[in-house]
Amino acid sequence: MQLSFNLEDISYLKMEYFEGEIERTLKLAIKEKKENEFIAVCETNGLSYIETPQKVAIDFIAHDGLYKTHTMLKEIRNEGEYTYFVIDNPASLDYQQNREYYRVIVEYDCIYSVDTENGTESFNAVTYDLSAGGVSIIMDENIISQEEMSIVICMTERNIKSHLKFIRCERFEESQYKLSFEFTDLAEKDYEILQNLCVTKQLTSFWYKLNSSLSFFLL
């Protein structure tokens, strides 16, 4: 597909490039999309020299999955604490299901907070499903806001925290609602914890189904 989706649909991108003969990966945010190119940005701190122009591999991590492509990194501009990357718009994108978007059914206690005119209100809730990209929670009320929304998920490893982008609301049973959100500023450590959780549960489910099938044929 062409690079035609909105910038807000893209959580971030990963760029693979070469520094001499060493392949490296850099996490970037998209700042601007133009007709023939787009501009991505990251913090300058700790960034090494990157030769331009060079062909790079890019993964666009969007709300609905992963899009992979190869294109040309044309120019790099250092402006204070930020570095800007001028990159050719790719001719096409290949969609690929990625393990970070596995959504698993899990139940964790969580605290859902909403900013209102009267201040921040917090509500106890439980997760319905969870991925490294977002979460659905079960609430007794349909409570969303045009202002800031955030969540704290109480997991064994640590409390997972992020601000939220509202996706949808669905009726759940007779008197409850399932609210679905996308994480907007998940910490790298929290992202890794959720990614590992989802992969582990997917593999557990796969082996359970496989063993069940083998047991059936052996009867």
Image (cartoon, rainbow, N blue to C red):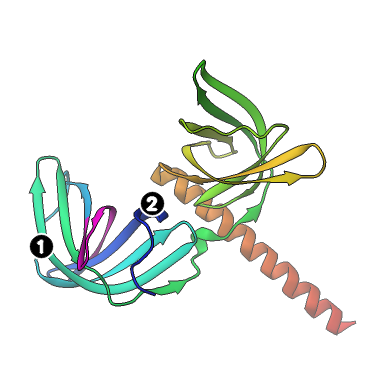
SS at badge 2: helix
Whether 106 is drawn above or below 53: the answer is above
Between tags 1 and 2, which lies in front?
Answer: 2
| Neighbours of disc 1 within 10 Å: few (<14), some (14-19), many (20+) | some
- For image coordinates 38% across by 62% down, the residue present is 5
Q: Is residue 49 in view from this perspective?
A: no
Horizontal arrangement in the rendering, residue 28 relative to residue 108 (left or right): left
Q: Earlier in the sequence, mark 1 or mark 2?
A: 2
- For image coordinates 40% across by 60% down, the residue present is 61
Q: CA distance from mark 1 to mark 2?
A: 24 Å
In the rendered image, residue 24 lying in the magenta stretch gets the answer yes
* Residue with the most extreme right position: 219
- For image coordinates 57% across by 60% down, the residue present is 102
Magenta range is 23-39
Residue 87 at x, y percent in the picture: 19, 65
In the rendered image, which residue does mark 2 sit on?
A: 8
Q: Quadrant of residue 93?
A: bottom left
Whether 76 is drawn above or below 91: the answer is above
Whether 177 is drawn above or below 52: the answer is above
| Observer-nearest of 61 and 5 | 5
Residue type marked 2: Glu
Labelled disc at residue 75? 1
